[in-house]
Image (cartoon, grey):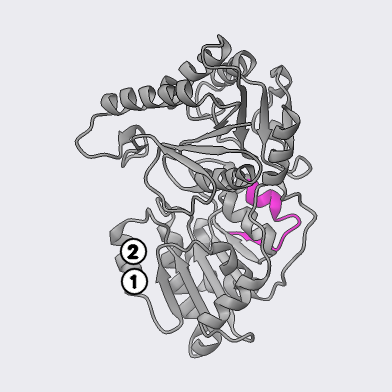
Amino acid sequence: MKVTYYCQHVLGIGHFYRSLEICRALAAEFPTTLILGGPDVRFDRGAIEVVSLPGLMMDRNFENLAPCTPGRTLDQTKELRQRLLFDYFQQKRPDVFITELYPFGRKAFRFELDPILEGVKNSSLGPCICLSSVRDILVEKKEGQEKYQQKVIDTLNTYFDGVLVHSDRGVIALESSFPRLDEIRCPLHYTGFVAPKVDGVGNKGIRTRQQIGDDAKLIVASIGGGNVGSELLFATVAAFRSLVGRNSGNYHLQVFTGPYCSDEAFDQLKKEQAANIRIDRFTDSFIHWLEAADLSVSMGGYNTCMNLIRTGTPALIYPFDQNREQAVRAARLSETMPFSLLTKDDMETTRFGAKLASQLCKQRSATKINLDGAAQTVRIISNLR
């Protein structure tokens, strides 16, 4: 059974990394192709076949799509993508097609997805099982909520065979952000949250390589992809300096800015680097850093939160404030995990330093939250054959 997974990231890299974790699990059982169409991102493909469409991303105002390739217009990019995607399906004929977020989101990509779904429905590209893959919380629509929900319902009922909800229903249910689930006729499958596994080796390896003793405190600060949130990193560095004072040898701060952090912000942060403060753009061992850390300071994206649950690391979480998604997730998870939420008022250096000190006193916490989402996705798909 051939599986094709479509993922379009336009802002951060959270959607991509959740999709990659699922595809890695799928590729262990089935020939799996990951179709990407966002800004370039480096990763280990392993057994996954990758098809890259001409890139589209959000513009500087985060309002409209823009081509990743200089000199190519939006219309040219869309026309080329549509043709390449349709040609792929005509040639490869996958047995399972999974769309990440669509139709709950990514409506700007209907131009290339709907022709595929219609082709499957009318059997010109089929037979093929079509599934939608969504996270725990959908971003609310500020306007046209009823029209949006009806379009999602109509699309699912017309073209899809099921919805994969990557959440633990006992923690966060999809109906909290999409209340009309009872109107969806195709089955909903809760998979559990998607998180990479850990083995404890990364913890020891990182502390050894960085020459951080077992009695020293390690804080890891991050902002996901780095498109937004650099103010959190600057505030963390200032608060860390105020907290540590002369005890610099017993405290270490590792900052990850994200690959899409602006050069200006990255260069400014680099000036803050010191013997006990390290600034890097990215690591492909982030979860191992969390294993090694005594405290995480981050935003509240899905992947970061799942990594924190997996490692049990105490955390200060500063939710993205343009929608409710991250704040709702962080608040719900803080009920059972050693997480504390930050606000804009907490960015003041003295106050932030006190927050760091308080959270550093907390211990790791084990949890019964279901993090088996990738493996459960494989089991669900296996049973659909």
Q: Are marks 2 and 1 in contact (CB under 8 Å)?
A: yes
Which residue ends up furthest to the left in the rendered image?
Answer: 71
Q: Element at badge 2?
A: helix
Q: Horizontal and vertical percent for residue 58?
A: 36, 38
Q: Tell me, yes or no, if residue 158 can be seen here.
A: yes
Point out which mark residue 95 bears.
none
Q: For the point 64% across and 60% down, which residue is it? A: 308
- Was residue 338 drawn as part of the magenta stretch in this picture? yes
Question: Quarter of the image containing the C terminus?
Answer: top right
Q: Looking at the image, is 298 positioned above or below residue 192? A: below
Disc on res. 266: 2
Amino acid marked by disc 1: Lys
**35 or 195: nearer the viewer:** 35
Q: Position of residue 95 (x, y in %)?
A: 60, 26
- Label 1 sits on a secondary structure element that is helix
Spot occupied by residue 184 in the image (x, y as percentages of width and height) = 69, 19
Label 2: how many Cα within 10 Å (few below 14, some 14–19, many 20+)? many
Relative to 294, residue 284 above or below: above
Label 2 amino acid? Phe
- The residue stretch that appears in magenta: 329-341
Residue 107 as seen in the image, left or right of residue 202: left
Residue found at x 72% / y 72%: 363
**Quarter-wise, where is residue 150 in the image?**
top right
The dot on residue 270 is 1
Name the side, left or right, on which 14 lies relative to 293: left
